[in-house]
Amino acid sequence: MAAFPGSIAFDEFGRPFIILRDQENQKRLTGVDALKSHILAAQQIASTIRTSLGPKGLDKMLVSPDGEVTVTNDGATILKNMEVDHEIGKLLVQLSQSQDDEIGDGTTGVVVLAGALLEQAGALLDRGIHPIRIADGFEMACQTAVKHLDKIAELFPVSAENIEPLIKVAKTTLGSKIINRCHRQMAEIAVNAVLAVADLAQKDVNFELIKVEGKVGGRLEDTVLVKGVVIDKTMSHPQMPKELKDVKLAILTCPFEPPKPKTKHKLDVTNVEDFKELRQYEHDKFREMVSLVKNAGATLAICQWGFDDEANHLLLQQNLPAVRWVGGPEIELIAIATGGRIVPRFEELSPDKLGSAGLVRELSFGTTKDRMMVIEDCSNSRAVTILVRGGNQMLVAEAKRSLHDALCVVRSLVQEPRVVYGGGAAEIACSLAVAAQADQLASLEQYAFRGFAEALESIPLALAENSGMSAIHVLGEVKAKQVATGDGALGIDCMATGNMNMREQHVIESLKSKRQQLLLATQLVKMILKIDDVRSPNDAQGL
């Protein structure tokens, strides 16, 4: 009862009632006022990232409290780095994050759609319609839109022999990113990376086998796909060989140092003989460790921990190249790629626990002394690494985010090979289907259906606005053509090619992504419309 917000009192008839504490320190919104506040907050956030939608969308620069600068047009990244205080604003941030986690693409569109739905809900509330009827109408309209999406979706060929269709989808995803000047190359890298680790029979892609590593310097065009593992480490000794062939790797999580008691200990050395004996013991231990690794047949030691100069010198002397301070995730990836076992104790090393790789070499970059190590031609060739280059840290980080989106889209196509057409074509087709369904309804939900149809048009409208067109005229023209021809591939011609057929422009999106956008946005809007009473501390006001 310690957290009870008030105290219980009794009236003269013995009936209990509660006296709430700190009423003057709390802000309370109820009924339509609460709903209007939520809608306003959501609209503000949606309008912030609306300008980032599409191939001509603009980037946002976000500066963190410690001065770190992020430049991006990825919806999830923008919202995650915005400091949003309003509780409904936070729900929109989580909405884009869940779209990012589930699909990886469409994070901007889902927030713009949610904002447009809430705007339509505000107009319906002003007409006196109950919020629950609006929420139920939106839910029914969403089901209609999803059914229509399934109807207009087309089967998509996914095969390792013909990768051109997958490259076209990846190019659509990368078209709105900062790296679109070399997006053919980036799309090929993304597709080849996914197909290298994909199990097409099971329709499964293990993302843990794809590592995206960034290195500042060079040009975006220098980005490469490595069939193996790249680690940001070098050989522990500068005189060790920089290139090894037909390597047997010992993957160790035990340090090259003499054993120590687990508990705190103190060693008193009172004379020179004792000290010499201690030195000799350490030396013998180092020799024993190195000989155990050598006897197992290893030609390279990958160690999770560091080792001192004496151990390093001894390893060089015994012609055993070594790499130290390799992180846990990298150790695991090396073990998967090379087919080796991670060994926690030197005594457990045996030839069958060693990994194998055809080539281990060091890469050097430009005039700097920066080097990275590449482990190639591994026994399990499914592990791949994308090494991203760029002129500065911001560009490398944005390129990594863009590649992540492309990888996710290709993965969703491997899992469910059906596509719809982009450029707002799918949204316009669904909007027309929902509006047509509204005319069949006699109940109050028909108003929610029409609101949903209008909200769907916010995506093509935003695309047209961001491309510098007269949005209403262009949308009206595309809608008229879709109604006349019944072709669900007609969309906004953002690139001003003179052709609004997205099938011919190869602007393709996965059905899974588009369906998820509609479902997530509708669920969130339904949840917000059911909130009619908000209690919060007085200081938490606004966004």
Image (tube, rainbow, N blue to C red):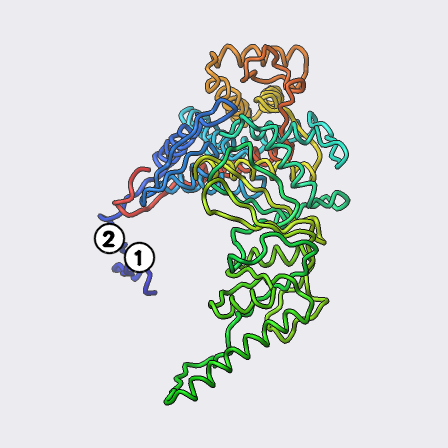
Disc 1 marks which amino acid? Answer: Pro
The answer to the question of whether label 1 and label 2 lie on touching residues, with beta carbons closer than 8 A, is: yes
Residue drawn at the location 65% of the way across and 27% of the way down: 168
**Closest to the observer, 231 or 299:** 299
Q: Residue at x 60, y 73 (%)?
A: 345
Q: Quadrant of the C terminus?
A: top left
Work out whether residue 461 or residue 276 is closer to the camera in this orientation and state it. 276
Q: Quadrant of residue 393?
A: top left
Query: Which of the labelled discs sits on residue 387, or is there none?
Result: none
Outermost residue to the left: 24
Element type where label 1 sits in the image: loop
Q: Position of residue 145 (x, y in %)?
A: 61, 28
| 399 sits to left or right of 42 | right
Label 2: which secondary element:
loop
User: 219 or 468: nearer the eye?
Assistant: 219
Q: x, y percentage for residue 538?
A: 26, 45
Write down the residue under mark 1.
5
User: For the residue marked with disc 2, what is the amino acid?
Assistant: Asp
Dot 2 alpha-carbon crowd within 10 angstroms: few under 14, some 14 to 19, many 20 or more: few
Where is residue 162? Give x, y as percent.
75, 31
Q: Residue at x 60, y 64 (%)?
A: 320
Asked whether residue 329 appears in the rendered view, the answer is yes
Specify few, some or many for label 1: CA neighbours under 10 Å numbering under 14, 14-19, or 20 or more: few
The numbered mark, 1 or 2, whose residue comes first in the sequence reads 1
Disc tally is 2
The part of the image, by quadrant, that contains residue 32 is: top left
Tell me the CA gap for discs 1 and 2. 9 Å
Indicate the position of residue 205 as horizontal and vertical percent values: 67, 45
Q: Which mark is residue 22?
A: 2
